[in-house]
Image (tube, rainbow, N blue to C red):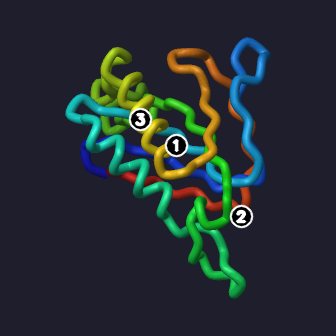
Amino acid sequence: MGDSVRALIQRVTKASVSVDQKTVGTIGAGLCVFVAVTHSDDEAAAQKLASKIWNLRIFEDEEQRMNRSVGEVTGEILVVSQFTLYGDTSKGRRPSFVQAAAPEIAEPLIEKFCESLLALGASIATGQFRAHMKVEIHNDGPVTVSVDA
């Protein structure tokens, strides 16, 4: 994967995220999207990733082929910020997160990503930036895909 805004997408039957034992976001069938930002990212990269995910054909059609996007199946999207997607484990036994953008850079870009999904017609829920979140996922398939902008 290159140095760009990235996401790990899981197709789900339902998903939720909670902070301090309080649910802050929940969806039915659709996608759980863990998203991370690196230093060189900008609003264009966030918009590109949103479009890519919105149009990604990972839902089955009538012939059981992955031929439909989340929008075509009227699925929902749960967006969870996840800086650990930039964890580098190439050296030592502890991941390095130096490629993850600082919170003051990442948060507005993740917000832009969410705004872009909404503009495309998505129904979204979100986690809480910089919070210790517990995510409950009910995989559908399971289908898990990593995506870079």
**Secondary structure of the residue carrying numbered label 2:** strand
**Secondary structure of the residue carrying numbered label 1:** helix
> How far apart in space, not on screen, are marks 3 and 1 (Cα)?
18 Å
Mark 2 — residue? 141
Residue at the spot 67% in from the left edge and 55% down from the top edge: 75
Q: Position of residue 91 (x, y in %)?
A: 31, 33
**Secondary structure of the residue carrying numbered label 3:** strand
Q: Are marks 2 and 1 in contact (CB under 8 Å)?
A: no
Q: Position of residue 22 (x, y in %)?
A: 78, 17
Q: Earlier in the sequence, mark 2 or mark 3?
A: 3
Pick the front one: 90 or 112: 112
Mark 1 — residue? 118
* Outermost residue toward the bottom in this view: 63
Residue at the spot 48% in from the left edge and 37% down from the top edge: 114
Eye-nearest disc, 2 or 1: 1
Q: Position of residue 135 (x, y in %)?
A: 69, 32
Q: Is residue 100 above or below residue 66?
A: above
Q: Earlier in the sequence, mark 3 or mark 1?
A: 3
Eye-nearest disc, 3 or 1: 1
The kind of residue tagged 1 is: Leu
Q: In the figure, is residue 83 to the left or right of 139? A: left
Q: Which mark is residue 36?
A: 3
> How far apart in space, not on screen, are marks 2 and 3 (Cα)?
24 Å
